[in-house]
Image: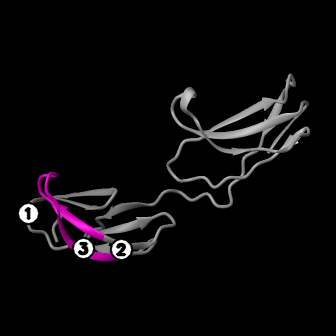
């Protein structure tokens, strides 16, 4: 919502160049307050434009709201003394993921499919090499010198 001392219009765009922006939303209000809604996509950058109708100018306040703002999920390596190493889901994410293993970061092999739940520990597969890398697509965790 935009509020100000002039008749304002609000628009939302995506794109990286001014001459090729794609309009996502446009307000249709024609008063001193203008509002619009659109469904934002995670990872997408948006440009928000506030413009005066015809020759209207002035100061404005821009209010942004989102129904739910969640921290992006991540995986942490748990290496507690006396405990087997494992992956812990951090953030409000749950789902199934395939753990991949590599010794050179160039070739990856699937080693297990697991359910990830916030705060729960997913054990890493038994060590086969002195230096191993594990990843769940879009997440990478390195394990070195940890006995299992």
133 over 119 or under it: above or below: above
- Choose top left, top right, bottom left or bottom right for residue 101: bottom left
Quarter of the image with the N terminus is top right
Residue 105: where, in percent of width, then height? 17, 52
Residue drawn at the location 28% of the way across and 70% of the way down: 98
Residue 137 against residue 104 in the figure, above or below: below
Q: On the image, which quarter does residue 52 sit in?
A: top right
Chain part drawn in magenta: 98-114
Image vertical order of residue 98 relative to residue 45, above or below: below
Residue 46, position in %: x, y? 59, 41
Residue in the picture at 63% in, 55% down: 39
Sequence order check, earlier mark of 3 and 2 = 3
Q: Residues within 10 Å of mark 1 (few under 14, many from 20)?
A: few
Label 3 element class = loop
The question of residue 107 being in magenta is answered with yes
Distance Cα–Cα, label 2 vs label 1: 22 Å
At 51% from the left and 32% from the top, the residue drawn is: 16
- State whether the magenta stretch is mostly helix, strand or loop: strand
Nearer to us: label 3 or label 2: 2
* Residue 79 position within the rendered picture, expressed as x and y whole percent measured from the top left: 28, 65
Neighbour tally class for label 2: few under 14, some 14-19, many 20 plus, Cα within 10 Å: some
User: Is residue 93 highlighted in magenta?
Assistant: no
Q: Which residue is mark 3?
A: 84
Instruction: Give whichever of discs 2 and 1 has the lower sequence position.
Output: 2
Disc number at residue 121? 2
- The numbered disc on residue 88 is none
Q: CA distance from mark 1 to mark 3?
A: 16 Å
Q: Residue at x 57, y 59 (%)?
A: 70
120 or 55: nearer the viewer: 55
Q: Secondary structure at mark 2?
A: strand
Residue on which the image places disc 1: 129
């Amino acid at each position: 919502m935009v509020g100000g001392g002039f008749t304002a219009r609000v628009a939302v765009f995506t794109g990286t160049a001014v001459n090729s922006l794609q309009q996502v939303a446009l307000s249709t209000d024609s008063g001193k307050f203008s509002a619009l809604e659109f469904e934002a996509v995670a990872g997408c950058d948006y440009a928000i434009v506030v413009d005066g109708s015809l020759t209207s100018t002035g100061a404005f306040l821009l209010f942004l709201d989102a129904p739910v703002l969640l921290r992006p999920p991540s995986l942490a390596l748990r290496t507690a003394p006396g405990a087997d190493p494992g992956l812990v889901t951090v953030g409000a994410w749950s789902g199934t993921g395939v753990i991949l293993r590599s010794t050179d970061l160039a070739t990856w092999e699937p080693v297990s499919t697991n359910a990830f739940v916030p705060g729960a520990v997913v054990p890493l597969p038994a060590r086969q090499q002195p230096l191993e890398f594990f990843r769940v697509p879009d997440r990478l965790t390195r394990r070195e010198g940890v006995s299992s």
